Image (cartoon, rainbow, N blue to C red):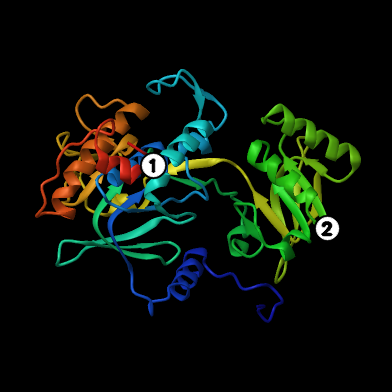
Amino acid sequence: MERQDGQAFRVDPLIRRLIQRFFAVDRSHPPIETDALIIGAGPVGLFQVFELGLLGVHAHVVDTLPFAGGQCIALYADKPIYDIPAIKRCTGRELTERLLDQADPFKPTFHFNQTVDALERQDDGRYALETSAGTRFVAKTVFIAAGVGAFQARKLHVEGLDAFEGTQVHYRLLGNDAVLRQAVVVLGGEDSALEAAIALCDSAAQSVTLIHRRDVFQAEAATLAEVKALRASGRLRFVQGQITGLRSQTRLHGLVVTDKDGQQNTVPLDHLLVFLGLSPKLGPVAQWGLDIERKQLCVDTATFATSAPGIFAVGDINTYPGKKKLILCGFHEATLAAFSAMELITPNERVQLQYTTTSSKLHRALGVSN
């Protein structure tokens, strides 16, 4: 859309996102009703699924990332972890795979690429929640296992760029074949950027250009070798410098890249994929009226309940005297939170502690023979 002077109208990004969200929500369908909603699919969130499953509770899990694993995958997928009980050494990726396998008998329902934006307690004591993707829930209990916060892509701050976010500017690799067949620019110098550039070169992309401030990258050796080979073959173009401006009318059609000597170069494109890393933010949780201390949720260590009945916080998102930010501590917290939640989920039933070594009921739930 253009003004009379030929310049493109710029819609405020917040207004645009609100409009998109309004039309994305299909309110003709009732919300998903669940006994337990877990916010966060990191290690502690996945173990929360398991502990609830042992008690006969099916859980829905929401995560802002497109995959399970949270910080373990986003920040150190291939780095070793040495303090998981009974496992001498494993990577973040391996730990995530083990936890997913452990939780599999209870068939959790995952909702990726979305954050829980709104939470409100209803008259019946349950919570109404809605995500950034328009998914709605009514939950008896809520478990916040958001680690150090919801991981969000670090944005590229160039004047005018926000107007093209979601149409030509993206912060993740797209699965749209029509998009991938066009001229694509990838910005970044770490694993995610290089892996996206490789995937695009393997697709039918018209052209792929990688932009980074230095001709030095941080990635696995195999990834670096593949990028080097693609550059040598001419299938991947590399431009060194920083994006300092745009070329646009009704659409974004070029990026101004300034090198270390101050020289400017225009790089044409149809789509820009930005991979500048992830940063954790407490996000909407801060607006839910829960007791917070230094951006962490205060909990009762007997139940790991927050200041709101039916809402629990486990893992790095919580705080209490003596708190240690360790995965193994989060596992302990998830166990106690699950038992505490049963008073709300099945208030008229007494929950007995059973052992997976001897309980035939738990063996049936786990799908194992006695």
Element type where label 2 sits in the image: loop
Q: Position of residue 92 (x, y in %)?
A: 50, 31
Which amino acid type is marked by label 1?
Leu
Between 358 and 56, the one nearer to me in the picture:
358
What residue is rendered at 19% in x and 42% in y? 339
Q: Which residue is mark 1?
A: 46
Say whether residue 28 is visible: yes
Q: Nearer the viewer, mark 1 or mark 2?
A: 1
Which amino acid type is marked by label 2?
Gln
Q: Which residue is mark 2?
A: 206
How dense is the environment of label 2, judged by Cα within 10 Å: few (below 14), some, or many (20 and up)? some
Q: Position of residue 146 (x, y in %)?
A: 37, 43
Element type where label 1 sits in the image: helix
**Residue 226 sits above or below residue 309 on the image:** above
Horizontally, residue 352 falls left or right of residue 13, namely: left
Q: Earlier in the sequence, mark 1 or mark 2?
A: 1
